[in-house]
Amino acid sequence: MKDNNTIATRHFEVQDYGLIMHGRVYYWHIPKALRYLNMQPGDIVKVPASRKGKYHGVYVVNSFREDIEVAGKVYKPVLDIYFRTPETRIIENEKKVYYNQEDLCKGY
């Protein structure tokens, strides 16, 4: 199995009642040194801003594997992870232990 190397993100704003997502989707490259973090939808990651020395926190919408050599696209790199999505619940099955909702869906 290969690691995800690209994430789709959106800028967000924090309000009293939750997060508000802003319009456009941005794509970022996950460097090999950070792929062990296994960034998933719901995480908030640190990315460079357009001004030098500034950084943004963005909300991960999707993470996927893209063959960059074939696609010919170049994305700016992710710098770090600010916040991880909490694990929803743990359910023990006869053969597997499911840790998040995506694994729950795959098991049935």
Image (cartoon, helix red, strand yellow):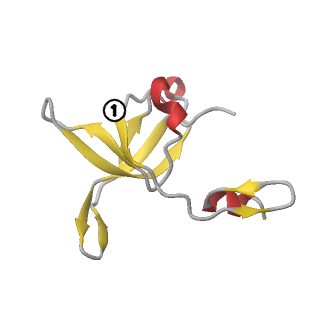
Quadrant into which the N terminus falls: top right
Residue 16 percent coordinates (x, y)? 24, 74
Q: Is residue 55 left or right of residue 76?
A: left
Circle 1 sits on which residue? 79
Residue 91 percent coordinates (x, y)? 72, 64
> Residue drawn 64% across and 32% down?
2
- Taking the view exactly as shown, the residue that stands out farthest to the right is 94
> Residue drawn 59% across and 34% down?
3
Q: Quadrant of residue 54?
A: top left
Q: Nearer the viewer, residue 77 or 99?
A: 99
Residue type at tag 1: Leu
Residue 88 percent coordinates (x, y)? 56, 64
Above or below, comparing residue 64 to residue 102 in the picture: above
Above or below, comparing residue 94 to residue 35 in the picture: below
- Taking the view exactly as shown, the residue that stands out farthest to the bottom is 17
Numbered disc 1: secondary structure: loop
Above or below, comparing residue 106 to residue 68 in the picture: below
Residue 50 percent coordinates (x, y)? 17, 36
Quadrant into which the C terminus falls: bottom right
> Residue drawn 77% across and 60% down?
107
Q: Quadrant of residue 90?
A: bottom right
The tally of labels here is: 1
Q: Quadrant of residue 93?
A: bottom right
Q: Residues within 10 Å of mark 1 (few under 14, many from 20)?
A: some
> Residue drawn 24% across and 65% down?
14
